[in-house]
Image (cartoon, rainbow, N blue to C red):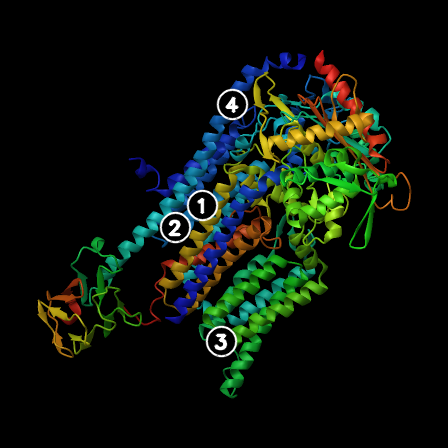
């Protein structure tokens, strides 16, 4: 057991190494952490960027009329944009082939159509089950109605505000 | 746009590929790093080792079995007893790597624990030398040494176990080799190519036909199924499906019971018992006694094999007398006999008693553990009684020790050589002593040695006697 | 508060990573290595200045350089740790690279005729190959280096960009690049065009095979396939090209000992650990011994791996900075790739789109090839890890591509396409 005795002297030194090792470990963890913070920071910036891009789109496309969502997006369990720009003829509905796809179960497959004709915008119900409303009034199937600035359009659970762009003025 | 969709698809594929890389890296780290770290060719190990004085290895009483000595600027492993522990401790070579205990307990011997490896806390900072942990193994050096002397130039193995704790007291395999690095590195190639396979740790990995020692297993089955009540008519020969099975030496025992049959090792009686038990019970017995099961041990072991799917009557008869397609390791037989001695409970075999840190703290101590149960206590008692008879008035007379009651069973296992030549059977003996309070259980096999009662029993006797005398002091 | 100095401003994190790393390097040994502090100052000043210029002068995308600066810092600190001299050189090369970055940025914006130089691109690349062939020096079994004085230069690096430009020229109007003046049947013209496209591609690949540049060969082939997949007209042409890979690979495997060796050592490097499998096994040992957080910069043994500062730098990073940092690097490349694709999607001009796609895919695939190679996920081929590996020509080339990408991101190339909401 002589070997054990002469090693006891190293005990204190051994303790010092332990403390050093723990500090070393902490610094290494910190190093990895900082790199991940960096990645997180970039992802966050990119996310903010994309988010602001959706809003700035409106600014860029000032000329075009658009639909603005009135509902709070947080309460909806399906994906919906804050704004939809109306630069051409579009259809709204649940199916993927529509220009504006909204997976609301109260919206029909192909629900409504928005057409642009000589600097005016018309809304047409394409035979939806739950109807399309403008300012609380239900559209008949196939009925086409002119949209005016500030009109409230209700479709499924969603309510949109129609905003006329400068293009139409 | 179609084009944009395709671009998104490219993005997704590429991201998946990146995630595969991350996943594979994690896989390497979690599942492969231990192996990579301990790879012989990973020079990092030796750089750690160069600054670590590898821990020492002692026997159960503190006899030094392995230590490191400075040779030039490097440390080299020294084994004072040369070849004696080559199949227990193994070797530690810069070129050929590590084996057995040196490999299993490498992290302890170098004192690098798992957690610090995961977190990279391996001490690479100081140039000062670090001490590894010491290991106390369960072997008794005197017993091991005696075992080595007894086998000497014979081929074979000795396993001695403390039946109550599962501690292995002696684990001798012959032939062996000098595990000191200088000798090892000079003779490696010739050793690898040698027909005697000196690198095979016979005690733990050698597979032998058990022969008559397997009759104790059959006896257990017979007792459990009430087949021990009957008496048999032994005419020295029995014909099973047109095939003759004879008693050893062509002896005729006449009207005998099972106790006498075990003592004289009657092949006729046991063949009958085997057929009476039937294939399902034989398979169940073999499985229960550990054939086909892995043995959890500190060094690598081989599984004993019982390779029957469908058994005809001949197979049943052959199995009952320990012949046929069954193979056991000496360690397995040692565990079985220790289990009988211990009233049916087989203790998990252990080779390491405790691990001591350089500042004399106890890091780990082995605790006895029941591995599995092979029989009821009353069955074990009956078998003990029969095995005692075998030593007193049967084939195992050569194992008898004056003043001590010994139980045992001999085996003379036929093999590929014994068919052509006389006295080339594997000689077996399993036994324990004292019967009332078993302190040591032994399994001995001598390859191509001849009769178990003549060759193996005396060896077992010396081992048991030595141990019992020592423990009296 | 903490957020403001940390993840709100990722550039701070780059500085912080450098502080920790150079602290390691300074205090690693006694006497303390104070010249590491100088390195730190140079690197951080360089990165911050460039970043400020990009932001202040509104040179488009800030993220590209931000991500690259992190990669560059990690590369420089690792190279410096492995070999201080190479570290200094790498810093010098980075400075040259940044100069080239701005130069290529302005050059690219100055001209809008890049899509008109098709034949020039072909000619230049052939000349570059011929120069290599005639004046080339063999380093590490690949005859692809031009040595001038004490500087060596790898023309095949430059050829990557030229090839991408050529592809962009071709796919700007798919299958209408060559022989438009002749009066052939349209179908004949298309076929001739396609054959010529494949001819140019395979000439490139042939030269590269001749130079034993397996990594770059694979890279060219994959860039070609991706661009073809996205912009090629007609499914069959793409399928034919894809199907052609198989015989090419088989022929390569049969006739080139090098390829065979690489595949064999990939499948089982352990059987010849001291010979052919040496590099990859050493690399795996390094990765395996790092743990999650690494041994700490300057405390591992990455120098045991051959070619550690070029091809195997990722293994060294894994050993000393841990698997977590390794994974972070892969994520950084993924972000870079994502930003590249984002740029591609945001611009309208087709030529620029293809150039941007080619560059992005090039960086992504190159990363995959080398990282996959050193961790034994795919056969190992020598290629540099963009922005991280040591090496002047690769670093400079990467900065050229980054400059072009930056220029494209900041240009108004939307005039050509139609707008749809």
Q: Residues within 10 Å of mark 3 (few under 14, many from 20)?
A: few
Mark 4 to mark 2: distance in Å? 41 Å
Instruction: Give x and y (percent) for residue C119.
Output: 54, 72
Residue C104 seen in the figure: no
Secondary structure under tag 3 reads helix
Q: Nearer the viewer, residue C240 or C347?
A: C240
Label of residue A18 in the image: 4
Image mark 3: chain: C
Q: Nearer the viewer, residue B241 or A154?
A: B241
Q: Mark 4 or mark 2: which is in front? A: 4
Is circle 4 on the same chain as circle 3? no
Identify the image quadrant of residue B182: top right
Residue of label 2: C63
Image mark 1: chain: C
Image mark 4: chain: A
Instruction: Give x and y (percent) for residue C115.
Output: 46, 69
Q: Residue at x 48, y 49 (%)?
A: C330
Q: Mark 1 or mark 3: which is in front? A: 3
Q: Mark 4 or mark 3: which is in front? A: 4
Image mark 2: chain: C
Q: Decide which of tag 3 and tag 2 comes sooner along the chain.
A: 2
Cβ–Cβ under 8 Å for marks 1 and 2: no
Residue of label 3: C235
Label of residue C69 in the image: 1
Q: Residues within 10 Å of mark 2 (few under 14, many from 20)?
A: many
Cβ–Cβ under 8 Å for marks 4 and 2: no
Instruction: Give x and y (percent) for residue C321.
Output: 51, 38
Secondary structure under tag 1 reads helix
Cβ–Cβ under 8 Å for marks 3 and 2: no
Identify the image quadrant of residue A73: bottom left
């Amino acid at each position: 057991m002589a070997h054990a005795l002469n090693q006891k002297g190293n005990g204190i030194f051994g303790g010092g190494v332990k403390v050093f090792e723990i500090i070393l470990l902490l610094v290494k963890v910190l190093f990895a952490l900082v790199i991940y913070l960096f990645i997180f920071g970039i992802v966050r910036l990119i996310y903010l960027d994309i988010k602001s891009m959706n809003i700035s789109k409106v600014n860029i496309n000032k000329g075009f009329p658009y639909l603005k969502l009135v509902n709070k997006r947080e309460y909806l369990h399906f994906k919906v944009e804050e704004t939809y720009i109306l630069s051409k003829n579009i259809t709204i509905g649940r199916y993927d082939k529509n220009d504006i796809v909204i997976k609301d179960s109260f919206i029909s497959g192909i629900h409504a159509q928005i057409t642009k004709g000589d600097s005016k915008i018309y809304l047409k119900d394409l035979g939806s089950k739950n109807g399309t409303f403008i300012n609380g009034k239900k559209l008949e199937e196939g009925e086409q109605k002119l949209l005016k600035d500030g009109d409230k359009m209700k479709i499924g659970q969603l309510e949109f505000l129609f905003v006329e762009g400068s293009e139409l003025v | 746009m179609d084009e944009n969709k395709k671009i998104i698809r490219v993005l997704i594929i590429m991201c998946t590929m990146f995630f595969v890389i991350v996943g594979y890296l994690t896989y390497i780290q979690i599942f492969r790093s231990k192996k990579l770290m301990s790879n012989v060719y990973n020079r990092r190990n030796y750089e750690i080792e160069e600054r670590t004085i590898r821990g020492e290895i002692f026997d159960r009483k503190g006899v030094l079995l392995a230590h490191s000595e400075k040779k030039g600027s490097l440390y080299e492993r020294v084994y004072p007893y040369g070849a004696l522990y080559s199949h227990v401790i193994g070797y530690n070579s810069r070129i050929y790597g590590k084996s057995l205990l040196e490999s299993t307990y490498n992290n302890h011997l170098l004192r690098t624990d798992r957690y610090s490896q995961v977190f990279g806390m391996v001490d690479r900072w100081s140039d000062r030398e670090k001490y590894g942990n010491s290991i106390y193994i369960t072997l008794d050096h005197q017993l091991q040494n005696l075992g080595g002397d007894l086998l000497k130039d014979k081929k074979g193995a000795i396993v001695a176990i403390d039946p109550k704790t599962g501690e292995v007291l002696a684990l001798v395999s012959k032939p062996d080799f000098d595990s000191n690095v200088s000798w090892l590195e000079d003779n490696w190639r010739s050793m690898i190519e040698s027909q005697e396979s000196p690198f095979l740790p016979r005690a733990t990995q050698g597979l032998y036909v058990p022969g008559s020692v397997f009759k104790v297993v059959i006896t257990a089955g017979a007792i459990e199924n009430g087949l021990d009540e009957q008496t048999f008519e032994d005419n020295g020969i029995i014909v099973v499906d047109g095939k003759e099975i004879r008693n050893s030496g062509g002896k005729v025992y006449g009207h005998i019971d099972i106790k006498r049959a075990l003592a004289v090792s009657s092949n006729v009686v046991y063949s009958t018992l085997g057929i009476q038990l039937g294939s399902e019970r034989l398979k169940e017995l073999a499985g229960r006694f550990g054939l086909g099961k892995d043995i959890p041990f500190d060094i690598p072991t081989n599984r004993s094999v019982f390779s029957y799917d469908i058994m005809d009557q001949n197979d049943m008869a052959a199995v009952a007398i320990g012949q046929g397609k069954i193979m056991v390791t000496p360690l397995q037989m040692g565990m079985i006999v220790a289990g009988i001695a211990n009233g049916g409970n087989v203790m998990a075999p252990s080779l390491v008693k405790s691990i001591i840190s350089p500042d004399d703290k106890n890091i780990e101590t082995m605790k006895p553990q029941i591995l599995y149960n092979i029989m009821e206590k009353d069955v074990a008692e009956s078998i003990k009684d029969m095995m005692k008879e075998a030593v007193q008035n049967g084939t195992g007379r050569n194992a008898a020790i004056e003043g001590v009651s010994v139980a045992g069973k001999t085996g003379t296992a036929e093999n590929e050589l014994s068919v052509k030549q006389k006295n080339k059977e594997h000689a077996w003996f399993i036994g324990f002593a004292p019967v009332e309070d078993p302190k040591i259980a032994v399994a001995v096999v001598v390859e191509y040695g001849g009769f178990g009662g003549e060759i193996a029993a005396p060896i077992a006797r010396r081992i048991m006697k030595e141990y019992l005398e020592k423990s009296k002091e | 508060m903490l957020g403001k100095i940390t993840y709100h401003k990722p550039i701070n994190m780059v500085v912080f990573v450098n502080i920790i790393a150079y602290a390691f390097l300074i205090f690693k040994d006694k006497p303390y290595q104070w010249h590491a502090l100088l390195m730190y100052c140079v690197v951080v000043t360089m990165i911050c200045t460039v970043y400020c210029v990009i932001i202040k002068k509104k040179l488009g995308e800030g993220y590209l350089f931000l991500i690259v600066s992190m990669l560059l810092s990690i590369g420089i600190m690792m190279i410096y740790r492995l070999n201080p001299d190479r570290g200094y050189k790498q810093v010098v090369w980075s400075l040259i690279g940044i100069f080239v970055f701005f130069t290529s940025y302005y050059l690219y914006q100055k001209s809008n005729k890049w899509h008109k130089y098709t034949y020039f691109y072909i000619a230049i690349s052939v000349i570059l190959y011929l120069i290599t062939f005639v004046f080339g020096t063999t380093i590490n079994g690949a005859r692809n280096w031009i040595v001038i004085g004490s500087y060596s230069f790898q023309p095949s690096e430059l050829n990557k960009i030229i090839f991408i430009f050529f592809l962009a020229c071709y796919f700007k109007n798919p299958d209408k690049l060559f022989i438009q003046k002749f009066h052939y049947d349209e179908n004949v013209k298309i076929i001739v065009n396609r054959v010529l496209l494949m001819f140019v591609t395979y000439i490139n690949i042939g030269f590269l095979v001749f130079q034993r540049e397996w990594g770059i060969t694979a890279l060219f082939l994959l860039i070609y396939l991706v661009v073809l997949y996205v912009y090629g007209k007609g499914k069959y042409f793409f399928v034919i090209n894809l199907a052609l890979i198989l015989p090419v690979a088989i022929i390569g495997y049969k006739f080139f000992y090098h390829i065979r060796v690489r595949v064999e050592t990939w499948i089982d490097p352990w059987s010849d650990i001291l010979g052919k499998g040496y590099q990859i096994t050493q690399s795996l040992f390094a990765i395996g011994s790092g743990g999650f957080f690494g041994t700490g910069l300057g405390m591992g043994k990455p120098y045991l791996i051959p070619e550690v500062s070029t091809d195997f730098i990722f293994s060294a990073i894994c050993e000393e900075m841990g698997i977590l940092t390794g994974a972070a690097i892969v994520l950084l490349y993924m972000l870079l790739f994502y930003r590249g694709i984002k740029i591609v999607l945001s611009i309208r001009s087709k030529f620029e789109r293809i150039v941007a796609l080619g560059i992005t895919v090039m960086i992504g695939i190159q990363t995959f090839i080398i990282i996959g190679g050193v961790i034994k996920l795919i056969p190992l081929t020598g290629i540099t890890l963009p922005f991280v590996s040591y090496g002047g020509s690769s670093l400079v080339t990467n900065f050229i591509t980054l400059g072009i990408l930056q220029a494209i991101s900041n240009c108004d190339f939307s005039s050509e396409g139609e707008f749809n909401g």
